[in-house]
Image (tube, grey):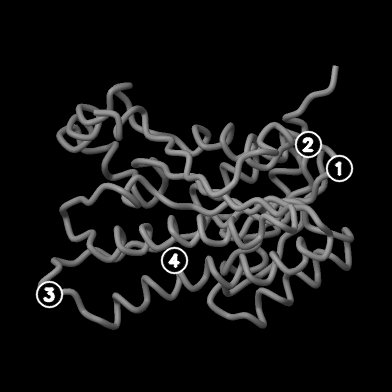
Amino acid sequence: MIDIFDLSNKVALVNGGAGGIGSGISLGISQAGATVVIADVLHIDTLNEKAAEIKAATGNETMALNVDVTNEKSMQSVVDAVTEKYGTIDICINAFGLNIKNPALEYPMDQWDAMFNINVKGTMIACKIVGKLMKNKGKGSIINLSSVREVRGYTGGNSAYCATKGAVGILTKTLAIEMAPHNVRVNAIGPSLIITQGTIHIQQNPELAKKYKAETPLGRLGKPEDLVGTAVFLGSEASSFITGQTIFVDGGLLAS
């Protein structure tokens, strides 16, 4: 029986692949059989260690590269290095993001610009450069990282974050339409709160943890591994007729 979720013989570039969400997705798609390239802004020694951990856990090929997602030359260098070694990129997952919280009426515009520079411009650059490669090949899957904040606002200084994720959502739909004639699919994953090193303080605070759990019908906090199934699905042949969608992995938050 053919396993339509199998990622064997596929090369996946994970931009932001050493972050809390990105590293969880990188491990998961490696477990599904993919050759994984972790690209991140961290020091290359740190990235190589992460790649080695994944290879040791799954036995599948891994590679680590530095990237500045806001710089086209940097992203092009990554794509060139991956194609030189592996010949292609079948899946591109843009798993990076930034959230600087400030009250809307006091939001510093330099920090606003920094948010859009990484979350939106960075996503566009990756889609543009990897998309060209996939267009020439006639096939590919791009998966962006959005959020429930794409469609649902929130308090606590999140005006810039919500705005960037709304932009990622409509960018995903627009690129999906433009790239569909070339058999390149563009989708997004929209998680609710995921506990990583950057958000561990919420889990460790009983009152905050209780608040977030109460907002979630499934009654628990999200983990990076909760996103793996969706990433594997969107990268595999199982989703071959799906494009332009944001799949919300939110424990039922948007249904409530």
Label 3 to label 2, Cα distance in Å? 47 Å
Of badges 4 and 2, nearer the viewer stands 4
SS type, badge 3: helix
Mark toward the start of the polypeptide (4 vs 2): 2
What's under tag 4, amino acid-wise?
Answer: Asn
In percent of width and height, residue 15 lies at 61, 60
Mark toward the start of the polypeptide (3 vs 2): 2
Label 2 to label 1, Cα distance in Å? 7 Å
Residues 6 and 36: in front is 6
Mark toward the start of the polypeptide (4 vs 3): 3
The quarter of the picture where the N terminus appears is top right
Using residue 188 as the reference point, say whether residue 157 is left or right of it: left
Using residue 219 as the reference point, say whether residue 98 is left or right of it: right
Q: Which residue is mark 3?
A: 106
Give the crowd class for mark 1: few <14, some 14-19, many >=20 residues within 10 Å: few
The quarter of the picture where the C terminus appears is top left
What's under tag 3, amino acid-wise?
Answer: Glu
Which residue is found at the position 79% from the left and 51% from the top? Answer: 11
In percent of width and height, residue 51 lies at 71, 52
Label 4 to label 3, Cα distance in Å? 21 Å
Q: Are marks 4 and 1 in contact (CB under 8 Å)?
A: no
Q: Are marks 2 and 1 in contact (CB under 8 Å)?
A: yes
Question: How many labels, in total?
Answer: 4
